[in-house]
Image (cartoon, helix red, strand yellow):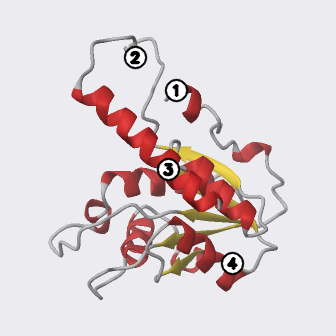
Amino acid sequence: MAQYESQVTVCQPQLLDTTSTYYIHVLGAGYSLDPKLPATSQLESTTLTRLVEGIRIARQLPHYKLVTSAYSKYGLESQASVAKRAAIELGIPSQKIEMLTTPSNTAEEVEAFVKKFGTTKKVIVVSDALHLPRAVMLYKKAGISAIPAPSNFLIKQGPNDYNGLTFPSYQSLSLMNNYFREQLKYWKDSW
């Protein structure tokens, strides 16, 4: 898992061309419409972490558009809209945010991006480290060389983290399940 996640490095905006405009596409990952909560608390933790990474990058670039995406399968307010409200709560001006409100999966998110913005924009795609190779591959298939911006690393290797060999546990089985599911999705989407 660590080797797979290390395929993408953390995005460093200070190394990018600051005269260009970047479209920071934060991929969706779930939400709950609970009206008593702020938008940041309505986003699933995975979505919120992706959004925070997108905002971290945006704050270091003079020219950007933050793009939120994902639909509502029940015809309610879309995940893209809730993520936009959360970004505004976190200090991003509304005029700097675009939404893609119809996609239900990663391939549709890339397709909706291309349909709305074309293939000539500079794109930074934000998703989980495990998921990002597939998202970047889908962008490449669509004619865009997207810059990966990983978040939600499953394996962290700091001095206080233990990722050594242990007997099978629920956590290790869950990691392997996530890895194999992502590999199958990558294989399917690469066809």
Q: Amino acid at mark 3?
A: Leu
Up/down of 161 relative to 61, above or below: above
Residue 163 badge: 2
Up/down of 23 relative to 174, above or below: below
For the residues labelled 3 and 4, the Cα–Cα distance comes to 24 Å
Q: What residue do we see at 85% from left, 61% from top?
A: 19
* Residue that mark 1 sits on: 2
Is residue 112 in view?
yes
Image location of residue 26, percent across then percent down: 53, 62
* Residue that mark 3 sits on: 184
Q: Secondary structure at mark 3?
A: helix
Q: Are marks 4 and 1 in contact (CB under 8 Å)?
A: no
Work out whether mark 3 precedes mark 4 in sequence or the reverse, and give the earlier one. Answer: 4
* Residue that mark 4 sits on: 114
Q: Residues within 10 Å of mark 1 (few under 14, many from 20)?
A: some
Image location of residue 170, percent across then percent down: 23, 29
Q: Are marks 3 and 1 in contact (CB under 8 Å)?
A: no
Of badges 3 and 4, the one in the foreground is: 3
Name the residue furthest bottom: 75
For the residues labelled 4 and 2, the Cα–Cα distance comes to 39 Å
The foreground one among 146 and 160 is 146
For the residues labelled 4 and 1, the Cα–Cα distance comes to 31 Å
The foreground one among 58 and 174 is 174
